[in-house]
Amino acid sequence: MHDLERLNIIRIIQFAPFDAFILQKSNLYRIYGHNPPTPRKIEAVEELKKGKDFHSVARKMNVTLATAEVYAIDSFAANAPLDETIFARHLEVDSNKFQGIRAAIERNTDGKLRTIKDELKDLFTYNQIRFVIACLIRDIEI
């Protein structure tokens, strides 16, 4: 085990019980929901990798903007090689918004996206919340 790995394990133990850490990750997956890959999601990822923006992807795929976002966010959550800054810019999620959404996610006890959305009083879209959950699943901070 490398020193950096040991240090990370020590940090986890210091700040939260290990079981709580595992539970948190499983809660993120529970909130996010079942996320199978589909040809449409793969198509959205390929278009974004070509440098297209979300509006262009939606037009090309003949779907709403929100649907194109979901396809890409789902793929990102499942580890597709996409840069989180594309989403952050498009969805207008800066560090302050990220931390606000994250706090609501961490307080969630019922594992439902709707409860998080309600707590945030419609200040954020479902896709902004999904994006933050996807980042947390991948251990990415904005």
Image: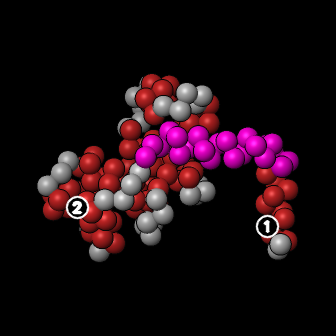
Q: Which residue is mark 1?
A: 5
Instruction: Report x, y in % for residue 140.
Output: 58, 57
Instruction: Report x, y in % for residue 110.
Output: 55, 27
Q: Give the crowd class for mark 2: few <14, some 14-19, many >=20 residues within 10 Å.
A: many
User: As shown in the figure, which amino acid type bears the numbered disc 2?
Assistant: Val
Helix, strand or loop under label 1: helix
Which residue sits at x=85%, y=48%?
14
The residue mark sitting in front, 2 or 1, is 1
Which residue sits at x=46%, y=59%?
78
Q: Magenta stretch containing residue 84, yes or no? A: no
Q: CA distance from mark 2 to mark 1?
A: 39 Å
Q: Magenta stretch containing residue 17, yes or no? A: yes
Can you see residue 97? no
Looking at the image, is mark 2 or mark 1 earlier in the sequence? 1
Q: Is residue 88 above or below residue 53?
A: above
Can you see residue 10? yes
Instruction: Report x, y in % for residue 9.
Output: 81, 58
Which stretch did the figure color magenta? 13-34
Q: Is residue 29 above or below residue 76?
A: above
Which residue sits at x=80%, y=69%?
4
Location of residue 54 by image quarter: bottom left
Q: Give the crowd class for mark 1: few <14, some 14-19, many >=20 residues within 10 Å.
A: few
Q: Which residue is mark 2?
A: 57
In contact (CB < 8 Å): disc 2 and disc 1? no
Instruction: Report x, y in % for residue 6.
Output: 84, 65
Q: Relative to the observer, which residue lies in front, 99 or 69?
A: 69
